[in-house]
Amino acid sequence: MPIKKNIEGGGGGLWRRSYTLPTILIVMALLGIVHLKGTYPLFGGEQVGSAINLTLDQMKTKDDDSDWEIKPLAIMKSRSQGFRPVYIYSNVTPDHMDQYSQEKQDQIILALTKANDIKANLNPRVEPPFFVDLAANDALVLSNTFFLEKNGWEGVCIEANPEYWYRLASFRTCTIIGAAVGGKPEDNGLEVNFALKGVLGGVVGHGTDNNEDNSANVVQVKRNLVSILTIFNQTNVPKVIDYMSLDVEGAESMVMEHFPWSDYSFKFLTIERPKDDLKEKLKLNGYKMVLVLTLYGETLWIHQPSVLLPLEEIWTIAGEYNNTYFSRVIP
């Protein structure tokens, strides 16, 4: 329905004209009164925290739908860092919704977080717990974070292999980032080779599982590196993160080499086979390895200033989930 708007002309006279709601909002956006966001950026500049968050289709149907609600799509802060939006349409549901991580890391983290929240008087929480999953791989199968998401967590899944993007976008509600991670912000855009080997794929390089020798006959694609700090800044990751799953096939040290430990912290981390340099950085920044969860070297770390649970309680909680292999790390 058109909205009648009186506008005073330059000669002092008054003239009338009918304006539709989309027209008014677009004019206001151009004047800097509001920002518009939608399935693609209409205007440049900072887009987080805008007063109105509508797609053009939403604006067109508002007057025809009395039950209309604003349900904004997730969007990056800006496109200035090389990120490009892709909105995937899917109307399918997973065949098996009860999917868990390989060695019940998800259930252990959920139980530890609940116990720690009680100790810290954070029950109930003001904000939901938050995870970072790097690399996410499949949306459901062996995911360390899908079960957390089902239990009300929010987070970010980061995955460089495009074969996983459709299912991640279809079955997950968290933010999905398709990128290879590493380096400093100044290194953003650096080109690397990425081996497409399913769950065993990753950046090809010295010291990674996918080195040049064993990846010679594997399909490789070019990828642009982006720093983990850039991703965190662009997706408004909270300063205190409840859980990070870090498993990038031997590239963990590269991913975390320039991490700003003083700006962000993780209450709990699971890291597969961390190298000595990463272990040392973790220890220097208040982290402690408390468990080895698997025969293949999956480790559990805590941020000691943030986790109030004693070691015995951590071991007891984790031990309730019947891992096939379980080793306490004695201080």
Image (spheres, rainbow, N blue to C red):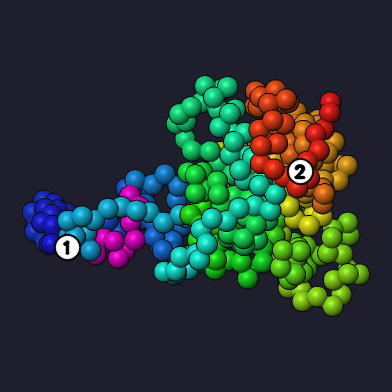
On whether residue 234 falls in the magenta region, the answer is no
Magenta segment range?
52-60
Q: Is residue 108 visible?
A: yes
249 relative position to 38: left or right: right
- 195 or 56, nearer to the observer: 195
Residue located beneath label 2 in the image: 293
Give the mark, 1 or 2, whose residue is nearer the N terminus: 1
Q: Dot 1, how many residues are within 10 Å of its Cα: few (below 14), some (14-19), or many (20+)?
A: few
Please give the label number shown on residue 120. Answer: none
Residue 310 % position (x, y): 70, 23
Task: Name the residue located 17 percent from the left edge and 56 percent from the top edge.
Answer: 66
Residue 139, by quadrant, is bottom right
Q: Do the residues labelled 1 and 2 touch (CB within 8 Å)?
A: no
Identity, as a three-letter code, of the amino acid under mark 2: Leu
Q: Residue under label 1, please give it.
A: 64
- Secondary structure beneath label 1: helix
* 45 horizontally vs 294: left or right: left
Drawn side of residue 246 relative to residue 167, left or right: right
Which residue does the image show at 49% across and 38% down from the upper left? 128
